[in-house]
């Protein structure tokens, strides 16, 4: 109970309306150069159609950016379908895709293939909507599904793509697609972008924007403390959040109104040991 109270109260010490470094109902998106570039690439994919590839190391913000982008698409022009291959078998993946497209799944793969193509054609030609199919955690994809994808989204007697298919995952997805057996699919990739992480300046902007978005009007972190956090996080937003949150917890427990370098380093060490 005492720990819970500490977690609930630690951000109020620092003049925050809520803790911006953990998942909240109010998400603060920081408009960094990397974020803008990623949105530009995703918009290009939606307009061009075909296959797109978005990769990045864990915690770089792929899913957050994709969710923000997808939520911003005009629902009268786009139909967004989301799937995560890490939690689905191959057969479940096709059945889920049929269901998300608004149809009733079949038991056999060939039937689901036909239904998926029919629904995409109906959306594209009758509803004038572009299906945007997002396959997250696609680094877990197996060769059989990859081979299926190029067939599944190949519409006979029609050279134009009718859907935008985004494969998102860890950088090793590029290695998988570089295999010779996937050359036909790789040739159809119209957008390929890797999130490299935040620069030092973007990291400072990220922390500042998070604090400002949570209503902060006071100095919470010493410059040297921010420097220590950014060095340890190596441009990864998830780790920046983790270190900042831990720093505030330790600062609050020590009744410190300013996060010093010592507090930040303790937080970093605690996170690395945890």
Image (tube, rainbow, N blue to C red):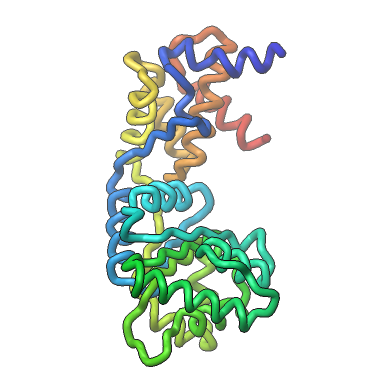
Of residue 87 and residue 228, the one placed in the foreground of this image is 87
x, y (%) of residue 113?
56, 79
Above or below 232: residue 156: below
Of residue 26 and residue 238, the one placed in the foreground of this image is 26
Residue drawn at 46 percent across, 21 percent down: 18
Res 148 → quadrant:
bottom right
x, y (%) of residue 264?
50, 25
- Which quadrant does the N terminus fall into? top right
Above or below 106: residue 215: above
Looking at the image, the residue that sits furthest to the top is: 255
Q: Is residue 11 left or right of residue 42?
A: right
Q: Is residue 139 left or right of residue 26?
A: right
x, y (%) of residue 77?
31, 60
x, y (%) of residue 153?
46, 79
Q: Is residue 197 visible?
A: no
Q: Is residue 198 left or right of residue 104?
A: left
- Which quadrant does the C terminus fall into? top right
Residue drawn at 41 percent across, 76 percent down: 121
């Amino acid at each position: 109970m005492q720990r819970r109270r500490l977690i609930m109260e630690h951000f109020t010490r620092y003049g925050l309306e809520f803790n911006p470094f953990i998942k909240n109902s109010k998400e603060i998106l920081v408009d960094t150069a990397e974020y803008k570039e990623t949105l530009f690439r995703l918009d290009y994919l939606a307009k061009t159609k075909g296959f797109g590839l978005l990769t990045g190391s864990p915690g770089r913000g792929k899913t957050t950016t994709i969710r923000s982008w997808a939520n911003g698409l005009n629902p009268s022009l786009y139909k967004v379908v989301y799937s995560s291959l890490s939690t689905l078998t191959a057969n479940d993946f096709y059945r889920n895709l049929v269901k998300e497209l608004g149809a009733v799944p079949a038991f056999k793969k060939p039937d689901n293939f036909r239904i998926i193509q029919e629904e995409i054609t109906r959306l594209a030609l009758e509803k004038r909507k572009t299906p945007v199919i997002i396959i997250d955690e696609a680094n877990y994809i197996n060769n059989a599904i990859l081979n299926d994808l190029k067939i599944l989204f190949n519409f006979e007697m029609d050279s134009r793509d009718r859907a935008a298919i985004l494969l998102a995952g860890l950088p090793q997805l590029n290695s998988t697609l570089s295999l010779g057996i996937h050359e036909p699919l790789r040739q159809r990739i119209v957008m390929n972008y890797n999130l490299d992480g935040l620069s030092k300046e973007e990291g400072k902007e990220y922390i500042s924007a998070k604090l400002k978005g949570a209503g902060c009007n006071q100095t919470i972190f010493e410059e040297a403390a921010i420097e220590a956090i950014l060095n340890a996080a190596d441009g990864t937003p998830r780790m920046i959040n983790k270190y900042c949150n831990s720093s505030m917890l330790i600062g609050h427990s020590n009744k410190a109104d300013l996060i010093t370098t010592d507090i930040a380093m303790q937080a970093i060490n605690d996170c690395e040991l945890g």
